[in-house]
Amino acid sequence: MALALVVTARRNDGDDHKGCISRSEVVLHVDGSSTAQGSGAGIVITTPQGEDLEFAIKFGFKASNNEAEYEALVISMRMAHETGAKHLLAYSDSQLVVKQVEDTYEAKEESMIQYLQQITDLNTKFHHFQIIQIPREENAKADSLSKLASSLEDCWTKHITIHYLPEARTPLAIQPITTGEDWRTPIIKWIEE
């Protein structure tokens, strides 16, 4: 897999999390995507200081949507562990992944069983780990990043930077509205008669 894009690191101004972020808790928003162009993951890591670290990760392998969802969770848990996080709260819009991790649904496919084992192994590295299913619209950032990553081709040969442009570089030309007669006036009068 290749890291395709780091969009931004910024202070999180809004509180869109259902849980309360403790001073030492790292919050993850994860999503996976699988399209005809490829597969990828979108990850938003909110640090205890309130900064959002956003990643779009393009996979160099084919993955189903459920596998992409699991990959996003595994990758984000590894990233959080590497930064020294001890308390982890993960949000995902994948009902299957959340319910399998919670042991509400049984994993039957071999790939899902292997992903669950990775999650279980990673879970031992944290003092506390919780995963919560959220509606897709509450996971919009991770969803957008995963779709971007899965749609990219040959991203490992490119560096993508996204900038925000708050306004146009040139003033808008406003066309004056004129009233009075012009070439349409005789036609309009003829139609009205």
Image: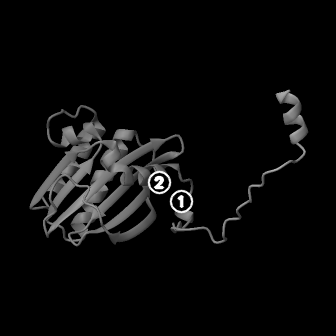
Q: Is residue 61 left or right of residue 91?
A: right
Place of residue 119 in the rendered image (x, y in percent of width and height, measured from the top left): 21, 50
For the C terminus, the image quarter is top right
Query: Going 70% across and 62% down the picture, which residue do you hit?
Result: 174
> Which of 119 and 152 lies nearest the eye of the viewer?
152
Separation (CA) of disc 2 from disc 1? 8 Å
Question: Which residue is most to the front?
Answer: 193
Q: Is residue 178 visible?
A: yes
Compared with residue 74, is residue 3 higher up or lower down, i.e. above or below? Answer: below
* Helix, strand or loop under label 1: helix
Query: Going 78% across and 51% down the picture, which residue do you hit?
Result: 179
Compared with residue 1, is residue 147 higher up or lower down, i.e. above or below? Answer: above
Q: Are marks 2 and 1 in contact (CB under 8 Å)?
A: yes
Residue 40 is marked as none
Q: Earlier in the sequence, mark 2 or mark 1?
A: 2
Residue 155 is marked as 1
- Looking at the rendering, which quadrant does residue 85 occupy? bottom left
- Badge 1 amino acid: Cys
* Helix, strand or loop under label 2: helix
- Badge 2 amino acid: Ala
Question: Which residue is most to the left?
Answer: 127
Query: Going 31% across and 57% down the picture, which residue do you hit?
Result: 75
Q: Is residue 60 visible?
A: no
For the N terminus, the image quarter is bottom left
Name the residue carrying label 2. Answer: 149
Place of residue 51 in the rendered image (x, y in percent of width and height, measured from the top left): 29, 70
> Which of 193 and 97 lies nearest the eye of the viewer?
193
Count of marks overlaid on the render = 2
> Which of 185 and 125 lies nearest the eye of the viewer?
185
Query: Going 53% across and 59% down the picture, which residue do you hit?
Result: 155
